[in-house]
Amino acid sequence: VQLQASGGGLVQAGGSLRLSCAASGRTFSGGTSGWFRQAPGKGREFVAAIRWSDGKTAYLDAVKGRFTISRDSAKNTVSLQMSGLKPEDTAVYYCAAREGALVISALQEARLYPYWGQGTQVTVSS
């Protein structure tokens, strides 16, 4: 299984970016996908997750209302639309996936995702 993340870049504060994560080697139609991020000198942080079966989502409080996670079953891809970006959103963003569904309260647990992409850098300038 490979997860390929793309879409990162440099953007000014208030701008938008769309991250995509394409899966190959397996479909996650009954599973869960998520995005995590890691800023320099900090630990990995949950950002957003979605259950493929019913589209239920969870978000980090700091990104609610600005970020939207979605999935495309036909393309086996998960996307993260980020708007209203702030300098504190600067980090390497990683996509993650698992084959089984999770209860909503567990969507943010990085240890429950066995598959990870390589990360894509998002830099927000002030």
Image (cartoon, rainbow, N blue to C red):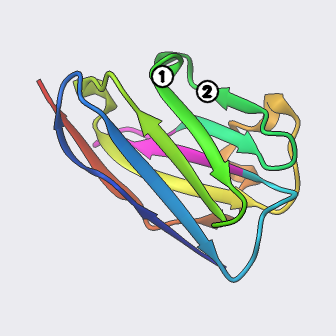
Asked whether 38 falls inside the magenta stretch, the response is: yes
Quadrant in the picture for the C terminus = top left
Image quadrant in which you'd find residue 40: top left
Does residue 39 show up?
A: no
- Left/right placement of residue 121 relative to residue 68 reads left
Q: Which residues are magenta?
A: 33-45
Task: Say which mark, if any, is on residue 3.
Answer: none
Residue at the image point whose x is 83% and y is 63% from the top: 99
Q: Which amino acid type corresponds to the residue marked 1 in the rendered image?
A: Val
Kindly state the secondary structure of the residue where label 2 is placed. Answer: strand
Q: Which amino acid type corresponds to the residue marked 2 in the rendered image?
A: Tyr
Q: How many marks?
A: 2
Q: Which residue is mark 1?
A: 63
Does residue 5 show up?
A: yes
Residue at the image point whose x is 69% and y is 29% from the top: 58
Relative to 124, residue 73 above or below: below
Q: Residues within 10 Å of mark 2 (few under 14, many from 20)?
A: many
Residue at the image point whose x is 76% and y is 60% from the top: 98
- Left/right placement of residue 126 relative to residue 90 reads left
Disc 2 vs disc 1: Cβ atoms closer than 8 Å?
yes
Residue pushed farthest front? 74
Q: Residues within 10 Å of mark 1 (few under 14, many from 20)?
A: some
Quadrant in the picture for the N terminus = bottom right
Q: CA distance from mark 2 to mark 1?
A: 7 Å
Residue at the image point whose x is 88% and y is 57% from the top: 30
Task: Say which mark, if any, is on residue 59.
Answer: 2
